[in-house]
Image (spheres, rainbow, N blue to C red):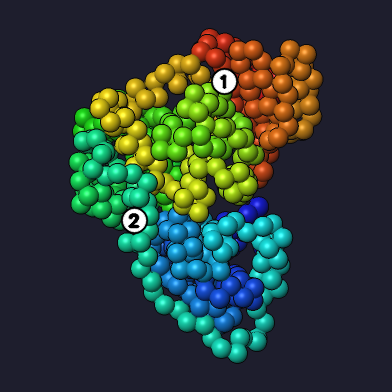
Amino acid sequence: MSAFKAYDIRGRVGEDLTEEIAYALGRAAAARDPGRVATGRDIRESSAALQGALNEGLADGGADVSDIGLCGTEEVYFATDHLGAGMGIMVTASHNPIDYNGMKLVGAGSRPLDDATFRALEAATLAGPGGTKAPARGRVETVDTRAAYVERVVSFVDPAALPAVKLVANPGNGCAGPTFDAILDAIVAKGARVEAVRMHHAPDGGFPNGIPNPLLPENQPVTADRVREASADLGLAWDGDFDRCFFFDETGAFIPGEYMVALLAQAVLAGEPGAKIVHDPRVAWNTIRTVREMGGEPVVSRTGHALVKAKMRETGAAYGGEMSAHHYFRDFMCCDSGMIPWLLVLAAMAGPAGQGGSSLGALVGEMRERHPSSGEINFRVEGAAEIMAAIEAEYRPDALSVDHLDGLSMEFADWRFNLRRSNTEPLLRLNVETRGDRDLLERRVADLRARIAG
């Protein structure tokens, strides 16, 4: 069962993940008596068959299935809550290679499954369904929840107050195109003046323009170039199941995720002064400063969607953000969304009533100057624990603080770093930031690189 990872399912189709495994998972999930299960799928060529097998397993196990069809992961999150389902399962491999697929699972209210529940599902799937089926087979019905989902997403902004903008939208031939269209139609109908230049828009499981993963530097120029060619005000790009949204400013410059976390925190705090904002510890200074200046309360969480969501529920935080471009909203079941962020960014570009608007580049420009960061640097190493211990020992005498919440975070007067181990690969991941000093950033990165790489 190598497809079962820490909290989701991913693997090569036909090897790690098969229709038989999908059926067995359905039977295992139904045995937990969820009542109704919401299921959906991405555009990958194997997704329809895997979802079909999953649905059959659920129904044979006695669960009713609400199949919402081709969608984004956040639409399954929404449907699970909206329909009162006891579980939601999205068939997707997001940005993984073309021969992969997978599944993301949530419980009632779209809460992440706890580890014990997920591991029990893994064991039951491995054991197989056997020959006994439920006394009464569940129903499988097609349900359209998109209109209700769009209404929820659009509720985060006042469409008529959004600025007149031209934007480039690049779904990368993943699932985002139809959903983006529905949201755009809805806000335009309510007075928004937004013009969209579409590219790589049609869902296509063959991914003729490559796997949609805008976080990779080599995938960013195509969107950046279109922003400049179209003289657009901003660019948007999504990964395959659009649970992550990436931004480009009016010059085509890619905006790293940590600055978008701070900008979205600002947007949320503008509507809810004093709110708590959850952030991850990899790159933190800019977010902490921004939240405090807006009168909010920054709350740190370990990296990972289940951990951020749990921290938000624990604290009542209005928003949570990770530098990896996952953005979570309390009023969206504390789940991540790739559509709510761009609406909030447009609202931020409009500025306060009567004060005029700002370009996206201007909104993040000061942040980038005040807190330059390295971006995440990955090192493939042996003996990661020993390397981290040696670095901590070397830097500790000069550190103002040392924290082990998520890897190793060390803070100094004018710079800080976070070094953490990958959960799935023999990698160390390094992030460095400074207080307005790019030369210092380069020196500290070079020092740490030499010590990590040996």
Hey, what amino acid is under mark 1? Answer: Glu
| Left or right, residue 208 beside residue 109 | left
Task: Measuring from the top left, give residue 26's x and y in whole percent.
Answer: 57, 73
Q: Earlier in the sequence, mark 2 or mark 1?
A: 2
Quadrant for residue 269, please give it.
Answer: top left
Task: Measuring from the top left, give residue 437's x and y in whole percent.
Answer: 52, 11
Question: Which structural element holds mark 2?
Answer: helix
How far is disc 2 from disc 1 in space, using C-alphas? 37 Å
Hey, what amino acid is under mark 2? Answer: Val
Q: Residue at x 34, y 22 (%)?
A: 362
Image quadrant in which the C terminus is located: top right
Q: Residue at x 20, y 46 (%)?
A: 191
Question: Which structural element holds mark 1?
Answer: strand
Image quadrant in which the N terminus is located: bottom right
Task: Measuring from the top left, give residue 292's x and y in whole percent.
Answer: 53, 26
Camera-side mark, 2 or 1? 2
Residue farthest bottom in this picture: 135
Q: Is residue 222 visible?
A: no
Q: Residue at x 45, y 16 (%)?
A: 369
Quadrant for residue 298, please give it.
Answer: top right
| Left or right, residue 163 beside residue 300 | left
Task: Measuring from the top left, give residue 81's x and y in whole percent.
Answer: 49, 63
Where 132 falls versus 312 (above or below)?
below
Where 133 falls versus 204 (above or below)?
below
Residue that carries the numbered disc 2 in the rendered image? 150
Where 381 falls versus 115 (above or below)?
above
Query: How packed is label 1: few (under 14 Cα within 10 Å), some, or many (20 or more)?
Result: many
Residue that carries the numbered disc 1 in the rendered image? 433
Looking at the picture, tell me which residue is in the foreground, 191 or 12. Answer: 191
Q: Residue at x 70, y 35 (%)?
A: 405
Query: How packed is label 2: few (under 14 Cα within 10 Å), some, or many (20 or more)?
Result: many
